[in-house]
Image: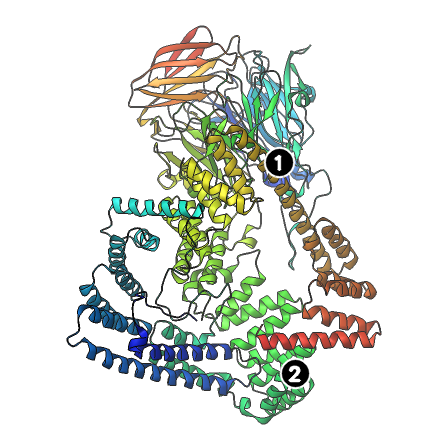
Amino acid sequence: MRRWRVEVVWLLLAVLAVPSTAAAQRDGFLAAWVEFYQTLPGAYGDEGPRLAAALEKMTAALAAWDREIRDGESQLQARLKGADANTALEVHAILAALYLDRSRFDDALREFDAAISIAPTRAAFHRYKGLIYLATARPAEAAEAFRSAWRIEPMDPQNAYRLIVYRSNSTTRQEADQALATFATVEADLIRLARPRATSPFRTTDAIDDDAGGALGFVPPPYARGFSLLQRGQYEEGLQALRAAVRADPLVADAASRSEPLTQGSAALRQGQVGTAIERFETAVAGAAGSSEAHRLLGTAYGVRGDIPLGVQHLRDAVRLNPRDERGWIALARTLEDTGERADAAAALRAGIDALPDSGALRWRLRSLNRERIDESDLGLLAGADALVLFAGKGALLGQVAGMARGHLDYDRALQLEERRVALTPNNAAAHQALGRAYVEQGREEAGYAELVTALLLDPLDADTLTTLGQLHLAAGRTPQALAALQRALARDPANSQALNALGNALIRAGRTEEGQQRLEESVRRQAQDVDDQRSRRTAAMLTVQAEVHMSKGEFDAALDLWKQAAAIRRDSVGSLQVADALIKAGRLEEAAAVLQASIPVNARSETHRRLAEVYAALGRADDSARERQAYVQQRLDELRRGD
Amino acid sequence: MAREAGLDFIHVNGASDEKFLPEIIGGGGLLFDFDNDGWLDVFLVDSGSLADPAVDRRARHRLYRNRRNGTFADVTDASNIRHRGYGMGACAGDIDNDGLTDLYITNAGPNALYRNTGGGRFAEVPNAGGAGSPLWSTSCAFVDIDRDGDLDLFVTNYVDTSRANQFCGFAGPPAIRDYCHPLVYPPLPNVLYRNNGKAPGGGVTFEDISMQAGIAPYRGNGLGVAVSDVDDDGWPDIFVANDSTPNFLFHNDKNGRFTEIAGLAGVAVAADGKPRAGMGTAFGDFSGIGRQGLVVTNHETEMHSLFLNLGGQLFSDVTIRSGVGPATRPYVGFGVVFFDFDNDTRLDIAIVNGNVMANVAQVRAGARLAQRKLLLRNTGERFVDVTKQAGPGFALEGVGRALAAGDVDNDGDLDLLVVNNGDRPSLLLNDGGNASNAVLVQVVGTTSNRAGIGTKLTLTAGGRRQTREVQSGSSYLAQNDPRAHFGLGGAERAERLEIRWPDGSNEAVENLPANHLVVVRQGKGIVSRAPLAR
């Protein structure tokens, strides 16, 4: 959760007191919103009342927030009467901050304008106006505001960045060149380590920081509208939409969810009493065979216990009874995927997407299964990614979808997505780096340069950013700059073969032929290693595919032999579960047990324990089987608790 | 308009369920004048089938004689050129300096050499005169590496598929087989054959000098070959485009040896330090600075590479800045030529593309094997994609492989021959390129090899200087018109033509009239000039 800070550091909040309590109410609202989101997965089935409670917290916090703002307004506006310029400026700035926090954009603009009329050379005010214009889809005015900020503080790299990126019609070539010169100075300072990294210099008007460290917080389709309204600052309308969604949520609307057997089962599952949970859920199903919730929870509980066929059966019943409940599809797909039934998992996800075309979670899960291909469902994701609603992580999602777009050879689309990613996570160095590369590859050097230097500003030690900058300078004939960037890149990452190759070329261009040749010779050696690595990877992958073909034909020994060959080439090319599966089917149970046991310290997936339990049971090793079964159940309960 | 012109050929690739890799790699073709009538003829290489003998028996190389009226006659039977093995590409050169152009055909297997005996007939030289190479050969080029006046031969080889054919593709179910990536096969060396001169009974013999020349240790997945004197020292150097491994640039050390310098020269890999799927390649002075730049076609997403020759055996990767990179990113490129299609004095680029995965739609929804060609116009600062304005010929999609440029109708602008894998070829006649002026120059060596291969020509017209080299090989499994074409723009004549012959001697001629085919014989100057049919 991001805290809004007004940049005008001379504000004496302690003196005025009022705004800090408004901030506290805002934080309370946001905390309740987070709690609401975290309750949505509904893993245990008893989350209905919790959803309603979180929603009430949000409503109360919003009301309190608005009360605090009204109180603040009264007090602050009273101080305006007869105020001197400094006090008036203070008041307008605080009011602007209060309104901005509350997404009352028109009111905030008015206050910033008033502040600017008193202090026209505060670049920050113009910058905030620009951000508000962006949030309200007024790009031309945003560009002008950013330009005004730049004209006041041209040496501030964030002003230079916005001048280039949000180029106004009034921006002259000379101004753009000046901004680029600022970047050159910043770049040189960063490389010389004469300038510290910038920590979150870019503000947005978003209440929740989208950058969740790579995590993707999909919002279930029935809640998408409500979340979207909240994210635009339309809190009252958003809460109203969420209320309607909660009312219709199976966690609330399914009559069985309030039944005694179901609530008892949920409680047992929370406490890790899986057997009891199953018993109660069975009773619930018996009493309400048409309840998708009952089947979903029973299927989940069976899955936790390792009774996969029963688990899958009830989850399939759940989605059959309520195909518009995303939770059922997710649970079904997860169970199938975890147990190695990838084709069935993919089929389930496709069916789920047919029923819920707006489900980002299902689309992304399917995409994760099909990483090597782009099929028709992925095209839907490519086209519709912008419209998906996430609580956080949308920038990260768009970055990954941009990768898909490149795989589909749609470079324009990839660029659009990278641009959106940067807009959502402007303090993410990797986002700027990716966009910078994309611009450079399209021949848009100025924009690419601006993005890359910004990436460097946010993370001066990133070798890939330094390397890309060096390559850009080298291609443009700016050899000294290329040398500086590439030498720094190699200092950070001596094994970076791209930097090595580029540095070798740069040294030769600079007349340092012997040094350059040494670097290039080293680069040639690394290239040969890279080719060998590629060769072994592809050969191992080929053998693995052949093994899978044999498996599908029931030729288990042939499959095992090929996996062995693949593993001899690249140890990481073969999964232990695949090998174990083949050994089991070939009747070589002792070997299967050994493979599974050996894999546990390396990669202790819950499914490994379950398979091992089955193998031990087949071998008559009841104690070992029970131990592994218990380990499996415990891991599954942990996963359920974490919401995995 | 190949079919209307009489090029009634369908490339037999023998595509099978077993997905033998050679099936997706061919076919080749070239433009040359086998009967010395001043009109370009066409030779098309057929492949065959590795899976089905009955299909294999249908494969036939084809020799087409230019009838000078826009059509061609199939004279294959009379030529005595027979198909055997699985054909890949070809190159042409006068190996015995008898004034008749001979043919070398590469195969996935032993190659073949046909000596032109005149009268439209060829005689196969047993064991290719010592240049049989049993490996999977792809592109080739004749080159006088030792400047002794006869043509030597360089052959690049691809990968070793001699072991059992591997299943690659998708496990499914259902399992879908596709062509394997070349990196799962061992790479092969290139072979350099020295021409040892006339053999008893006619023809010449070739000797494999790869080891003593210093090229034998270098193994790659060779697909394209282009020859040029990259450092302007008067000795030809040889570039090999390797598929997924670093390219080679063999610098001629003038003493029968070569040094591999691609890494140091900056053409082994792309600017990001990674090798590309190098397929087709060509040298050309695209920047007009008098040094031969280099283009290499690569796989989709990689961008086809363009390297600017900086001199001193150094190149700069200008792929992105030149505009070539962004325009080519979605394509799997093969044949490529530098040619001045609009006679504006600047070398443009044409590329034929086509995928290599039979089931590419499995990887990328909507993807197809056939891809469109590209025409990139050189504006002097960048290359701009003008394919959409290039007419119906460029609108056709195909599984493009070989590409050769030449003035097929002797009207002063360059036409294009395209060979498509498993399909008919295309003959794209340039309609309107000769709205501006041009001159075609044919060189005839006397102390140099008779075909003049390796000759460097520098023409001055209207204050501009342009450089061309007479080359064998180049592109992909192909060879271009051996005559040097210069667009003159609005200039009515070329003031001067400087000639550096392959043996190192220099000569100059002056006042070449625009829109003429000019023949220059070594030591004699211009020996004929004939107006082009505009």
The colour scheme used to paint the residues is rainbow
Residue A545: image x %, image y %?
67, 54
- The quarter holding residue A72 reads bottom left
Instruction: Judge left or right: residue B127 versus residue A221.
Output: right
Number of residues whose C-alpha sits closer than 10 Å to that of mark 2, classed few (under 14), some (14–19) or many (20 or more): some
Residue B450 shows in this picture: yes
Residue highlighted by disc 1: B221
Q: Which residue lies furthest to the front in this view?
A: A15
Question: Camera-side residue: B10 or A285?
Answer: A285
Tell me the element at label 1.
loop
Residue highlighted by disc 2: A272
> Is B362 above or below relative to B44?
below
Residue at the spot 34% in from the left edge and 84% down from the top edge: A63
Tell me the element at label 2.
loop
For discs 1 and 2, the disc positioned in front in the rendered view = 2
Residue B431: image x %, image y %?
36, 31
Q: Which residue lies furthest to the left in this view?
A: A82
Residue at the spot 62% in from the left edge and 37% down from the top edge: A525
Q: Residue furthest top?
A: B524
Q: Distance between the residues labelled 1 and 2?
A: 59 Å
Residue B196: image x %, image y %?
65, 13
> Residue B23 shows which numbered tag?
none
Question: What amino acid type should be assigned to the residue bearing mark 1?
Answer: Asn
Chain ID of residue with mark 2: A
> Is B19 above or below relative to B268?
below
Question: Camera-side residue: A164 or B206?
Answer: A164
Residue B328 shows in this picture: no
> Is A523 above or below relative to B492?
below
Instruction: Judge left or right: residue B294 versus residue A86.
Output: right
Which quadrant of the figure contains the N terminus of chain B?
A: top left
